[in-house]
Image: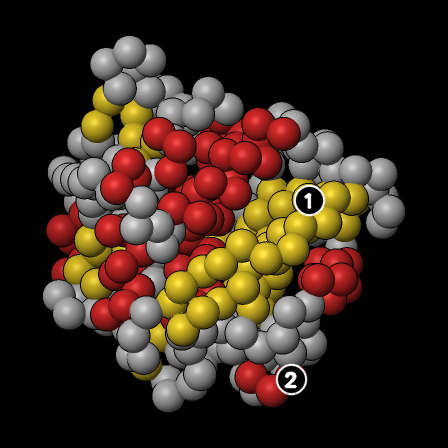
Amino acid sequence: MAHNYRFAIFLTLLSAIAGLSAGALVEEQPLVLKYHNGVLLKGNVTVNLIWYGKFTPIQRSVIVDFIRSLNSKDASSSAAPSVASWWKTTEKYKGGSSTLVVGKQLLLENYPLGKSLKNPYLRSLSTKLNGGLRSITVILTAKDVTVEGFCMNRCGSHGTSVSKPRRAANGAAYVWVGNSETMCPGYCAWPFHQPIYGPQTPPFVAPNGDVGVDGMIINLATLLANTVTNPFNNGYYQGPPTAPLEAVSACTGIFGSGSYPGYPGQVLVDKTTGSSYNARGLAGRKYLLPAMWDPQTSTCKTLV
């Protein structure tokens, strides 16, 4: 079973239309992610990348640099707030740290399965670089590739390479994220584009100058955190296992302090480019990362 990410943003924006306060939402449903005694992805975890469709070298480097920044101890990328400090919240989940290491990369620029992918195709693609149980295969689809459910009720998903996700022995974890630049940036690349629902606040300027890829970073960050803390559908989550709220999807739409439905919160602004960010990474890169649920405080934790 694949876990879809982004439907919660639709609910968040609808609540803004209805005039509900963030406080009222929390009051109705306390944010507690229960641990269901399953296996988590801890220790060294290899991240293999499949680029489906055409990505420029710059686009690929922005995404690879982000993954490498998650566990970076490089002094140039450790200035607070950092990508690595954001990822350290995953250490508070049972089992200690999850150290992500970039493994193999496969470029499929000739669209071997076409430009319209069904759900089974994602699982099939994930097996091309299957690195075993201590791995995550990340499938990234280009802006001209449609995927079942993309832009309708999800911007990405995570699942396993076989159809029985509750048993770790049955397969490796995978993540899929699509580039929404031309199809639905208001749904999958918010707040770098005006939202399709709710208050039409001015969009943020993308920190890497690419609305589609900077939106992918938000969704990739979400799904990597969700995957290491709930890889086989019996880790940390709230709600039904078929539609769980997970480590970051439970905190959808929150990027900085003072956020409320339809407003991402106060973040940092680059004085030169005017771009918005809340995390520094390798090679001087800047990223905007969503809040993550902190098991110690039972709250959505932001970097700024």
Q: Residue 230, can we see it?
A: no
Tag 1: residue type? Trp
Tell me if mark 1 has few (under 14), some (14-19) or many (20+) residues whose alpha carbon lies within 10 angstroms of its own: some
Cα separation between marks 1 and 2: 25 Å
Q: Quadrant of the C terminus?
A: top left
Task: Check the image and report above or below for 138 versus 141.
Answer: below
Task: Check the image and report above or below for 18 versus 102.
Answer: above
- Residue at the (68%, 36%) spot, across then down: 142
Give the side of residue 27 with respect to residue 289, left or right.
left
| Coordinates of residue 265 in the picture (x, y in percent) | 21, 35
Describe the element under mark 1 as helix, strand or loop.
Answer: strand
Task: Check the image and report above or below for 63 versus 251.
Answer: above
Q: Which residue is mark 2?
A: 170
Q: Nearer the viewer, mark 1 or mark 2?
A: 1
Tag 2: residue type? Asn
Q: Residue 51, can we see it?
A: yes
| Coordinates of residue 52 in the picture (x, y in percent) | 72, 44
Relative to the observer, which residue lies in front, 77 or 30?
77
Give the quadrant of residue 259.
top left
Q: Which residue is mark 1?
A: 51
- Residue at the (46%, 48%) spot, across then down: 67
Relative to the observer, which residue lies in front, 283 or 174?
283
| Coordinates of residue 41 in the picture (x, y in percent) | 44, 74
- Residue at the (68%, 77%) spot, across then down: 163
Give the side of residue 297 with respect to residue 40, left or right.
left
| Coordinates of residue 150 in the picture (x, y in percent) | 62, 45
